Amino acid sequence: MRKILIVDDDNILANSLRKALSKLHYDAVIREGGEEALSFIKSQETDFILLDNKLPDMTGLEVLSHLKELNVKVPVVMMTAYGTEDTAIESMKLGAYDYITKPFDLKELEGIMESGFNTYRLMQNIDETIPCLEKEFCDDQRMISVSKKMQKICKMIGQIAETDLTVLIRGESGTGKELIAQSIYQHSLRKDKYFLAVNSAAIPEALLESELLGHEQGAFTGAVKRKIGKFEQCDQGTLFLDEIGDMPLPIQAKILRVLQYGEFERVGGTEKIKVDVRIIAATNKPLEEYIQKGLFREDLYYRLEAVTINVPPLRDRTEDIRPLTEYFFKKHSQKINNGVKNIHNTVFKKLESYGWPGNIRELSNTINRAVALTKGDILTDENIILGGLKLNDDHVDSSTKWINEIENKIKHAVEAELKLSEHDIMNKILLPIEKIIIYFVLEKCNWNQVQAAKILGMSRTTLREKIKFFKN
Ligand SMILES: Nc1ncnc2c1ncn2[C@@H]1O[C@H](COP(=O)(O)OP(=O)(O)OP(=O)(O)O)[C@@H](O)[C@H]1O
Ligand SMILES: [Mg+2]
């Protein structure tokens, strides 16, 4: 059970928070003052700290400074009163993971806690010895690299990890780009600082800029308070720009500026903010082609590609298949625990002659499925279903197949909307989608409403009402 320390002398708030957190299966304890809190942290394991700034004996900021001196690596979230944004920003500079303005709701806190745990998980499991990538740095985060090609990549990671060079990681989906980015971070001099990731493909354009650079209060509708972006939060740390090929052009320009001058302005702000952030970027997109088509900035490309790691697809490093299979077998059979103990030799042959379009992710899923299907204690080649996902997809109604592809985007859109407000989510997400479908069908039918209504499966009156609604 994760242990949460609440540092606040407001008994009513602290107690209700403790109760709410225990319902979520956290073990929360309360300390009223800074000294008490610090001695608790020194003597007991703590997974998360919720810190109020107004304490009887010192400020929350002072507590943060002490934690920094003590090199305590636990996510701290500052609780600030409305109108004390400066304290909030100061706290981020002192290493707080985030801040939350009172009164807040539990859902907001839960979201921050989850992402805090994820971030710190990486920061805690550091191999302190030499850059040896075969070491297990986390229960489920090992990087298997037996093939010559992967060994070469490991060497390269060793050479560049401790520099501040920008790194571009390229490779097909599922080849391990993110794992490599994490490995660079873990072997870098910035390993005690943040490693944060932003996925350009998953965040709507309108929100991506503020996610990266932050925004000032009132910068746009919904910007009810100042927000600190990932760049600022990640000062001194490492920022992983995942799927950078999907980053919209205007944001590419801003990123280039941060890379060149180390400074930027929050959305809607004029203050120049200086940061020292190491960038690791990744993509599976053909950037050179994107440049030709005007989808990717050439200057940004040259800035990024100085150190490029090309991760080969799994079919080009078949020596890795066996050790990877054994690794995933161990991992999944431990989890499923259905008594499967061995892998039959024929399994490897079958796996090594397959093309792995989904690369290591597909291999992991294949082994997971095989372990679950195995009856008895030996996994045989009969349990290996290759291209299984595609096979299943054929049985799915074609009109619903696309949903798998955009599922994550929808989830991110919901999350983004939730950050702005918690009302009327269904309409906010569905209406724009409905509009796209209706207008597209209308276009296809040359705006013949009778025909379009039939295709859309709605009455002509309904269609007319919808068109009128969307026009307003
Ligand atoms: N060398 C490796 N050893 C062990 N596991 C690996 C290795 N490479 C990748 N994996 C695992 O395979 C999965 C996919 O890896 P990862 O997410 O890093 O790929 P990616 O290249 O970022 O994919 P995408 O382009 O789809 O984002 C993860 O679960 C990761 O832990
Ligand atoms: Mg990835």
Image: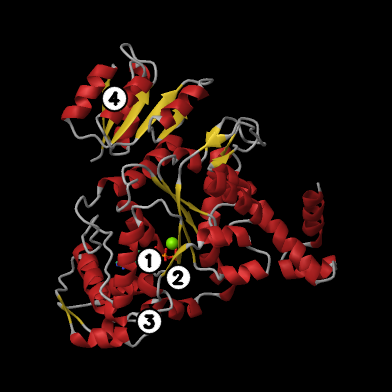
| Quadrant housing residue 12 | top left
Q: Which mark is residue 171?
A: 2
> In the image, what residue occupies the spot 32% across and 11% down?
56
Q: Residues within 10 Å of mark 2 (few under 14, many from 20)?
A: some
Q: Is mark 1 within 8 Å of ligand 1?
A: yes
In percent of width and height, residue 279 lies at 46, 52
Would you name the residue on which mark 1 appears? 176
- The type of residue carrying mark 3 is Arg
Q: The N terminus is located in which quarter?
A: top left
Closer to the camera, 241 or 383? 241
- The type of residue carrying mark 4 is His
How far, Cα to Cα, is label 2 from label 3? 12 Å
Residues at circles 2 and 3 in contact by the CB criterion of under 8 Å: no
- Residue 102 visible in this rendered orientation of the protein: no
> In the image, what residue occupies the spot 37% across and 66% down?
176
Between discs 3 and 1, the one toward the N terminus: 1
Would you name the residue on which mark 3 appears? 315
Between discs 4 and 2, the one toward the N terminus: 4
In percent of width and height, residue 82 lies at 52, 21
Between discs 4 and 1, the one toward the N terminus: 4
Q: Which mark is residue 347?
A: none
Residues at circles 1 and 2 in contact by the CB criterion of under 8 Å: yes
Between discs 2 and 3, the one toward the N terminus: 2
> In the image, what residue occupies the spot 25% across and 39% down?
2
Residues at circles 3 and 1 in contact by the CB criterion of under 8 Å: no
Between discs 3 and 4, the one toward the N terminus: 4
- The type of residue carrying mark 2 is Gly
